[in-house]
Image (cartoon, rainbow, N blue to C red):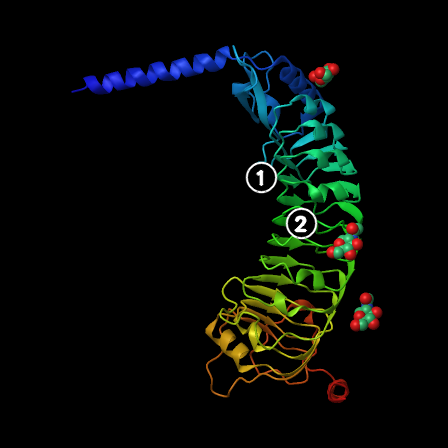
Amino acid sequence: MAKPQFFLFLLLFLFLTHQSLQQQQQQISAADLAALHDIRNSLRDLPHSDFFSTWDFAAPNPCSTFTGLLCSPDPSATATPLLRVTSLTLGTGLAGSPGLVGSLTPALSNLTALTQIVLYSGFVSGSIPPQLGTLKNLRVISLTNNRLSGPIPCSLSTLPNLHTLDLSGNQLGGPVPASLTRLPSLKVLILASNHLSGELPNVTTQLLHLDLKNNRFSGLLPSMPLSLRYLSLCKNEMWGPLNVLVRLSELVYLDLSMNSFSGSIPESLFRPTLSSLLLQRNNLSGGVPRTLADDATLYGEGSIVDLSHNILSGELSPVLAGVEILFLNSNRLIGIVPDEYVRSVSVGSMKTLYLQHNYLSGFPLEPGSPPLPDSASLCLSYNCMVPPIGTMTCPANAGGLFSRPAYQCQAIHRGNAD
Ligand SMILES: *[C@@H]1O[C@H](CO)[C@@H](O)[C@H](O)[C@H]1NC(C)=O
Ligand SMILES: *[C@@H]1O[C@H](CO)[C@@H](O)[C@H](O)[C@H]1NC(C)=O
Ligand SMILES: *[C@@H]1O[C@H](CO)[C@@H](O)[C@H](O)[C@H]1NC(C)=O
């Protein structure tokens, strides 16, 4: 009975040994090996990091022994194809590993079969070698959370296959090269948390994800592709109206918080498919529409809308009653909180409702109605009402005042009546 199994194992064994022999017979290209030497000499492990411990150049085949390498036979060679490095990952990316220190050598560009290069968090400094722009097969460049400085090389704009460029968490300066935003294959562009500045170029490539938060960009919103699903420009110095966003119907995540955008919020941005709408700390005025453009669906679980710290006016719109986490604090909102909001907080679908620092005049919690769930975060302080007893779970910075001085309330209501 054991015989057929034995033969199966034998076949498998022969197959595997044949494979590994073939791999061992295949040599890494001399140019790639020289480049790896140079990479090894320009970077080192920080104490308590052991990425390079496997990089032993005396070993017969780096492709099967070095951590961070993936190789493939060179498709252009015929007889005995050499192995080429197609993917290079520098650093372990393990939590608690301090990573690498040193710099990125221009010799990286000798790994001409490279399709992907990743550098994990560490202290690697110096500039991004412009020579990376010669690696025409590159699809992914991810050099994040290090100390890279200098400009974003314009040469990267010539990579025809580049799909993802993530240079976030470094000290890069200067502008975004306009040519970069025209790369034909680029889908994901993440330059967050650097020192980049200047005005943003118009984006014409069919990007899906654009994250430029935490830089020093200024000026107006550029025109952006209709394909965009994720956009963050949080914490920059941008201003002007939001009109150009009206046509971006695929957006599911929009964060323009902490800028100086002004004017009213386009009605089309209030739609449940755009389930994260973060516009806090700008100079936005006007109100929230009373009905949704597409009123077939409602905001639901997982949705977050933060319009706090603007100059929004008018009454609260019932449209936002389904939002799970809603911040409207520090605006100029008036009127009574709609019943729909109270109901959503009562049933627990609205988990956070911050309305402090407005001019609201009532929260219709009927006497004898069941208490609001303990899990709800509700803040009504500093409005034109005495907040209902036991409803207050304000953040520490909401201030201790329970109501706004009466003269302020009279002034805004007079102002609104004019
Ligand atoms: C990279 O390639 C160039 C040209 O082929 C060569 O002159 C140079 O020595 C190589 N550098 C390294 C570090 O391999
Ligand atoms: C960007 O596009 C807008 C129109 O969508 C145009 O008015 C503006 O001049 C363009 N900016 C640049 C720098 O090309
Ligand atoms: C905010 O907008 C108002 C007009 O709506 C304008 O007067 C004011 O200068 C703006 N403030 C800033 C800081 O942009």
From the image, which quarter does the C terminus lie in? bottom right
Residue visible at 40% across and 13% down in the picture: 18
- Position in image of residue 100 (x %, y %): 67, 30
Ligand 3 in which quarter: bottom right
User: At numbered mark 2, what does the secondary structure look like: helix, strand or loop?
Assistant: strand
Res 411 seen here:
yes
- Position in image of residue 267 (x %, y %): 64, 70
User: Which residue in the structure is indicated by mark 1?
Assistant: 95
Q: Earlier in the sequence, mark 2 or mark 1?
A: 1
Q: Nearer the viewer, residue 353 or 185?
A: 185
Q: Of the residues shown, which amino acid type is indicated by label 1?
A: Ala
* Disc on res. 211: 2
Q: Nearer the viewer, residue 223 or 93?
A: 223
- Position in image of residue 174 (x %, y %): 81, 43
Q: Of the residues shown, which amino acid type is indicated by label 2?
A: Asp
Q: Nearer the viewer, residue 58 or 50?
A: 58
Is the shortest distance between ligand 2 and the CB of mark 2 under 8 Å? no
Residue visible at 34% across and 14% down in the picture: 14
User: At numbered mark 1, what does the secondary structure look like: helix, strand or loop?
Assistant: loop
